Amino acid sequence: MVTAIIAAGGVGSRLKSHTRKPFVRLQGRPLLAWTLSAFEKTPEIGDVVVVIHPADIHAAWRMIRTFRFKKVIAVVPGGDSRMASVSHGLQAVPRRNKWVAIHDGARSLITPALIRATCAAARRFKAAIAAVPVVPTIKQASNGWVAGTLNRDHLWAVQTPQVFHRDLLERAHAYGRTHRVKATDDAALVEKLGHKVRIVMGDHRNIKITTPEDLVIAEALLKSTRLK
């Protein structure tokens, strides 16, 4: 089985001044509840570890009990970086579990279908990530001037989940700590080991909700589509 680490916040960012992001409501449910629901419905996922701001641990447990999520086995404090938070989550993963899925808790519209597809690719290649082709034209810039135009045919916007064999992920994080690598996702650490990472076609609905405008888009997506 796969253990999912849900990175729900290390520094406790907010979409609204009075509410931390994991607990902002989307159609009446907290963002984190939408995220956990998708993993709860995915047969490949055996356990879930939530990584969250230390001040939110008790609130997270209350929410987990309210929505009766059965797969959550631990809620642990996040660190001061993405890499530190995932490392904290890894320490709570049962040793018997050899596969780990990392997911950004702010991607609340994730579907069980995408989770399953990424897990399947990881079992074959030991490392897999969800991603979508880049749509806009991307420019390189220098001092406010265009320095070049990148070829979109080779560019992908990375999403989560990202799924890895546990041994590979732990080696990648150890390398990152030893060499002080500043990585924005776990795949970048795995790449540093020279291991290839398989791309799985993601979902344009799988947006990262970071601004009030993203919340409006997520509301519209939920109203217009049925996530499966």
Image: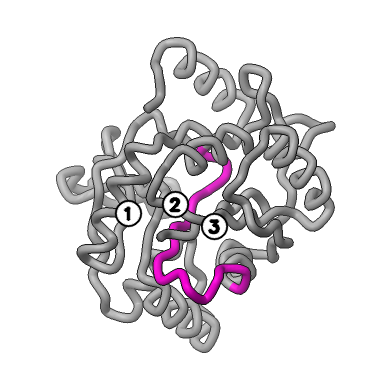
Kindly identify the residue that appears in the image at 66 percent across and 51 percent down: 9
**Relative to 160, 50 lies left or right:** right
Q: Nearer the viewer, mark 2 or mark 1?
A: 2
Q: Is residue 58 above or below residue 30?
A: below
Q: Answer few, some or many: residues within 10 Å of disc 3's Cα (few below 14, many 20 plus, some between 14 and 19).
A: many
Residue 186 is tagged as none
Give the extent of the magenta segment: 91-107
Q: Nearer the viewer, mark 3 or mark 2?
A: 2
Query: Which quadrant would the C terminus be assigned to in this image?
Result: top left
Residue under label 3: 5
Residue under label 2: 45
Kindly indicate whether the residue at mark 1 contacts the one at mark 2 (C-beta within 8 angstroms).
yes
Q: Is residue 104 above or below residue 187?
A: above
Q: Position of residue 74 (x, y in %)?
A: 67, 59
Kindly indicate whether the residue at mark 2 contacts the one at mark 3 (C-beta within 8 angstroms).
no
Dot 1: what SS?
helix
**Among the two numbered marks 3 and 1 on one chain, the one whose residue lies closer to the N terminus:** 3
Kindly identify the residue that appears in the image at 71 percent across and 45 percent down: 13
Q: Position of residue 47 (x, y in %)?
A: 53, 56
Residue under label 1: 119
